Image (cartoon, rainbow, N blue to C red):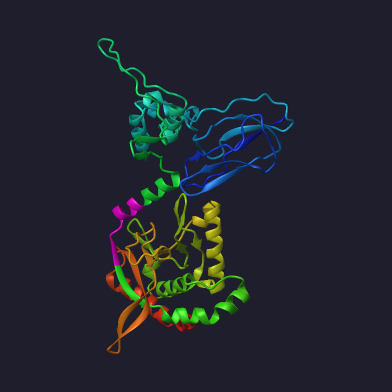
């Protein structure tokens, strides 16, 4: 019998732990080499775990919903197909990588876990913690509930008959007559997004400046070259490449818009890595266009299309999301007219793009109809003054209303 261990992929330094989603195989099943056995969710991406060898899956060390660390063993395969089958371990039974510390902090529950414990009539002592230093996580509580854990009786002076609360699955719908509710735990990605947005609002002095842009010149240019562009590059010419190029022009002119705060220092970046906000079923991700100043319109469109496909398939990698010096959020794809985007830390500014609509405007004393887009740029007032923010947005406006400027870098 030859046993091969299946391990959690190497996680990035900023990711301490991940959550097991659902096993696609059960003990006793035959697996092929490189067959995807389970997906593991971190607070940034979802990673696929393939079978390192062909054989029979003989043991699941960590069950669905378990919390795991980098390089942790989660299952075993018998490559000769002769091993005894071992049942999957419940998620609540997973042991953290640092058991020594768990003894001292094992009676501590994470905030979300504490809420779930209360909802299910359990205490922190009723659930084995698998988080850092033995802390109880949401996954631990969900696993314990699924395994039928019951609350330990509280010490009292005399025995008191009490009806234990039923162990109800957290995601199960609750009947309220003709109205229903369903409690679903946040995914790691959603929880991380929430944490970063709160961090941004609490640590940055966020202001937003607005301007309107006549998109007719960009629309005319796009219409003029669309067919030739698609034939030459195999991709449609969209609007986002124009916004990226306009943003880079402004960042070059006002470098503080491309800077970040590190303690009491301002870090000026000599490169332009533009994050493009992309919505996915699991939450918001911001993949990065690296060295956007060196990319052509075709390069930008092709990369954005690649990000969109990977996001749809849940295959955005950590490398795709790492870094970034400035971000662009396009709420216009959903019909948004105006918004105040939140800065993506540690960046200091973000551009919000909205829906282009025909509006009445005044030109040379005459009321005319033009396709107008309202741009919004939020910025960290700790290092960016109103002058740089307003003039930076004006630079973007000028570049979009006269796209030829982008060709001559003026």
Give the image location of residue 250, x and y in percent: 40, 74
Q: Along the horizontal axis of the image, is 346 left or right of 160? A: right
Give the image location of residue 287, x and y in percent: 49, 59
Q: Along the horizontal axis of the image, is 218 left or right of 59? A: left
Q: Along the horizontal axis of the image, is 3 left or right of 163? A: right
Name the residue furthest front.
178
Q: Residue at x 67, y 24 (%)?
A: 84
Q: Residue at x 44, y 47 (%)?
A: 189
Which image quadrant for residue 120? top left
- Whether 113 is drawn above or below 86: the answer is below
* The magenta stretch spans residue 15: no
Task: Name the one closer to the observer, 328 or 215.
Answer: 215
Task: Name the one closer to the observer, 304 or 389.
Answer: 304
Residue 11 seen:
yes
Give the image location of residue 212, x and y in percent: 33, 75
Which image quadrant for residue 279? bottom left
> In the rendered image, which quarter contains the N terminus?
top right
Residue 316 seen:
no
Name the residue furthest top.
158
Q: Residue at x 49, y 61 (%)?
A: 288
Name the residue furthest right.
80
* The magenta stretch spans residue 206: yes
Magenta range is 197-208
Name the residue furthest left.
157
- Whether 362 is drawn above or below 273: the answer is below
How many numbered circles does the render carry? Answer: 0
Give the image location of residue 254, x and y in percent: 37, 73
Task: Name the one closer to the observer, 213 or 177.
Answer: 177
- Whether 9 is drawn above or below 396: the answer is above
- Whether 394 is drawn above or below 268: the answer is below
> In the rendered image, which quarter contains the C terminus?
bottom left
């Amino acid at each position: 019998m030859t046993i091969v261990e299946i391990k959690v992929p190497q996680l990035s330094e900023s990711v301490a732990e991940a959550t097991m989603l659902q096993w696609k195989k059960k003990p006793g099943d035959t697996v092929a080499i490189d067959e995807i056995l389970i997906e593991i969710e971190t607070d940034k991406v979802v990673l696929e775990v393939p079978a390192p060898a062909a054989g029979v899956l003989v043991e699941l060390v960590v069950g669905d919903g378990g919390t795991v660390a980098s390089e942790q063993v989660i299952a075993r395969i018998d490559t000769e197909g002769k091993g005894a089958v071992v049942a999957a371990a419940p998620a609540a039974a997973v042991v953290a990588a640092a058991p020594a510390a768990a003894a001292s902090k094992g009676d501590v529950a994470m905030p979300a876990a504490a809420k779930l414990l209360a909802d299910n009539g359990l205490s922190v002592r009723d659930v084995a913690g698998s988080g850092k230093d033995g802390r109880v996580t949401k996954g631990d509580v969900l696993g314990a509930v699924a395994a039928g854990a019951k609350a330990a009786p509280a010490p009292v002076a005399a025995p008191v008959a009490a009806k234990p609360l039923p162990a109800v699955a957290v995601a199960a719908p609750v009947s309220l007559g003709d109205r229903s509710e369903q409690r679903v735990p946040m995914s790691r990605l959603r929880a991380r997004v929430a944490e970063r947005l709160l961090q941004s609002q609490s640590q940055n002095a966020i202001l937003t400046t607005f301007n309107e842009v006549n998109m007719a010149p960009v629309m005319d240019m796009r219409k003029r070259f669309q067919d030739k562009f698609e034939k030459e590059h195999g991709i449609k010419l969209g609007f986002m490449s124009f916004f990226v190029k306009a943003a880079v022009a402004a960042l070059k002119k006002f470098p503080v818009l491309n800077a970040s705060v590190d303690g009491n220092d301002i870090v000026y970046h000599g490169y332009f890595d533009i994050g493009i906000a992309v919505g996915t079923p699991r939450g918001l991700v911001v993949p990065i266009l690296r060295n956007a100043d060196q990319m052509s319109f075709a390069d930008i469109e092709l990369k954005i299309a690649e990000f969109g496909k990977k996001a749809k398939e849940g295959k955005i990698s950590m490398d795709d999301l790492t870094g970034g010096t400035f971000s662009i959020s396009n709420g216009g794809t959903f019909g948004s007219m105006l918004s105040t985007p939140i800065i993506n830390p540690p960046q200091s500014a973000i551009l919000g793009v909205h829906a282009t609509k025909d509006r009445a405007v005044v030109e040379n004393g005459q009321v005319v109809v033009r396709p107008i887009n309202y741009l919004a740029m939020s910025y960290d007032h700790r290092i960016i003054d109103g002058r740089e923010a307003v003039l930076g947005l004006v630079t973007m406006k000028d570049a979009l209303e006269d796209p030829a400027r982008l060709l001559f870098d003026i």
